[in-house]
Amino acid sequence: MRKFFIGLLLAGVLFGAQKTAIIEVEGMTCPLCTSAIKQSLRTTPGVIKAKVILSTKKATVVFDDTKTDVSKLLHAIEVVGYKGKVVEVVK
């Protein structure tokens, strides 16, 4: 049992606490918009995966919360000229 808890502790340290943020993005009008936002999010340290969908005007971002947070994700969106609003963050 002790080895199990040590394994869980190490997994948390090695892999971090992964979360998913759903962000509404204002101002997207074309596929180039989604590409710019996706690229900016993906280059943010701690982001594991980013998906941006034009039709829903939402970005889904999987990130390591030991390396980044939602304010940095929103900043990455603002840097390329859009405004984001966090709808939901799930573990």
Image (cartoon, rainbow, N blue to C red):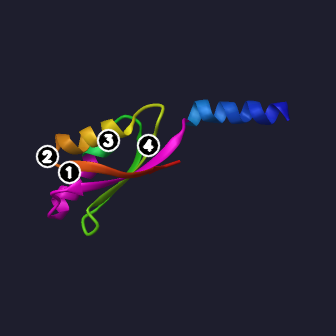
The residue where tag 2 is placed is 81
- Disc 1 is placed on an element classified as helix
Q: Picture coordinates of residue 62 (x, y %)?
A: 44, 48
Do tag 4 and tag 2 residues touch (Cβ < 8 Å)? no
Mark 4 or mark 3: whose residue is earlier in sequence: 4
In the image, farthest residue toward the right: 1
Q: Picture coordinates of residue 54 (x, y %)?
A: 24, 65
Front tag of 4 and 1: 4
- Disc 4 is placed on an element classified as strand
- Cα–Cα gap, marks 4 and 1: 18 Å
Do tag 4 and tag 3 residues touch (Cβ < 8 Å)? yes
Label 3: few (<14), some or many (≥20) within 10 Å?
Answer: many
- Cα–Cα gap, marks 3 and 2: 13 Å
At 41% from the left edge and 36% from the top edge, which residue is drawn? 46
Label 1: few (<14), some or many (≥20) within 10 Å?
Answer: some
At 54% from the left edge and 35% from the top edge, which residue is drawn? 16
Mark 4 or mark 2: whose residue is earlier in sequence: 4
In the image, farthest residue toward the bottom: 55
Q: Quadrant of residue 58?
A: bottom left
The residue where tag 1 is placed is 36
| Side (left or right) of 3 relative to 28 | right
